[in-house]
Image (tube, rainbow, N blue to C red):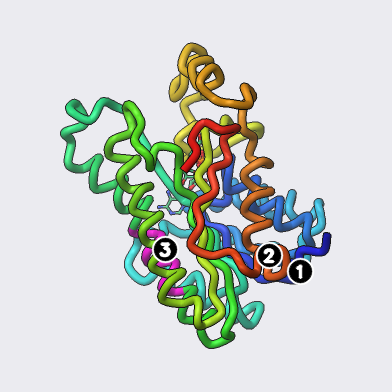
Amino acid sequence: MDLGLSGARVIVTGAAANIGRGIALGFAREGARVLLADIDGEQAQAVAAEALAVGAAAAEVFEADLTGEGVASTMADRAAAVWGGVDVLVNNAGWSKPGFFAEQTDRALWQHTIEVNLYTAYASTQAALAVMREAGAGAIVFISSDSAFGAIRQGIYGSTKAGLISLARTVAREHGRHGIRSNVIAPGLVIPDAPVGPHSVWAAGTEAIFSPEQTDYVLRTQALRRLTTPGDIASAVVWVSSPTAARQVTGQVIAVGGGSSMP
Ligand SMILES: NC(=O)c1ccc[n+]([C@@H]2O[C@H](COP(=O)([O-])OP(=O)(O)OC[C@H]3O[C@@H](n4cnc5c(N)ncnc54)[C@H](O)[C@@H]3O)[C@@H](O)[C@H]2O)c1
């Protein structure tokens, strides 16, 4: 099936590691042009090279901390200046530190989690909407999480991910008439299948974040009993971004975690 994404101008935030890398490579395989926005420029350059190798029509790196004032606008302006517009924005940049809610009393941790997970999505979405509205077309994808529906040790993080669902649906309702679709992909546990940089939550090693026992628990409580890969998330993101295959899909939450959640 032709997804109509050849030459599409795609921004992926947090594209230098794990899920963001997988998403960028997914669009690259469709022949899209990808702007990899990440605080980790070195790792993003490595992913850009991979993207070109698998078929991207172009791959640009935008190295920046997306929580900074005005940074997301500069990112969208850059895509518009280089490629003349933005067809797809994927709000993937995120950060989390698991912990029991009653114990996560550090306000700086709340602040950082909210800034990376929500603020970057607010700013990036507003910046992209300005460009997409002019064109009368576009697709925005928010990377939420199973944790959005309530999960142990994910209170602060999960509440930001639930916020993304509300935002995505508001954008869908407010901008459908401008030809813009807005959807959510909610991944289950996704362990990196390639090297990550120092800003990745996985930088300390997979087992420091998810012990083998915790991974085993996820598998036992999930319907399909197999781990979700970055490629699994990419397939869903690419499909829901397609102006042909998913042209009538907006405001939806699609969980990609082997049935770990069923929103
Ligand atoms: N991995 C999972 O199990 C899982 C499950 C559900 C949802 N998610 C969500 O998927 C997304 C990606 O997860 P991941 O596992 O690939 O995370 P990751 O930490 O490996 O990658 C996140 C990327 O975002 C970049 N980044 C962080 N803060 C940034 C900032 N302020 N400005 C610009 N770039 C920044 C990092 O450098 C990194 O490249 C996140 O939103 C995460 O919450 C992940």
Report helix, strand or loop for mark 3.
helix
Q: Which residue matches tag 1?
A: 4
Answer yes or no: is residue 63 visible: no
- Mark number, residue 242: 2
- Mark number, residue 169: 3
- Answer with left or right where residue 258 lies relative to residue 208: right
Dots 2, 1 in contact, CB < 8 A: yes
Report helix, strand or loop for mark 2.
loop
Magenta segment: does it hold 124?
yes
Q: Main secondary structure of the magenta part?
A: helix
* Above or below, 62 relative to 151: below
Q: State which mark lies toward you, 3 or 2.
A: 3
| Span shown in magenta | 119-127
- Give the residue type at disc 3: Arg
Q: CA distance from mark 2 to mark 1?
A: 6 Å
Q: CA distance from mark 1 to mark 3?
A: 24 Å
Q: Residue at x 60, y 67 (%)?
A: 88
Task: Give whichever of 211, 64 is nearer the camera.
Answer: 211
Q: Which of the 4 image quadrants contains residue 113?
A: top left
Instruction: Locate residue 122, reporting x and y percent.
Output: 37, 64
- Give the residue type at disc 1: Gly
Task: Give whichever of 227, 105 is nearer the camera.
Answer: 227
- Give the residue type at disc 2: Ser
- Answer with left or right where residue 248 lies relative to residue 32: left
Structural crowding at the residue carrying mark 2, measured as other residues with C-alpha within 10 Å and reported as few (<14), some (14–19) or many (≥20): many
Q: Which residue, as the protein is rendered here, is positioned at the far top?
A: 213
* Above or below, 226 relative to 33: above
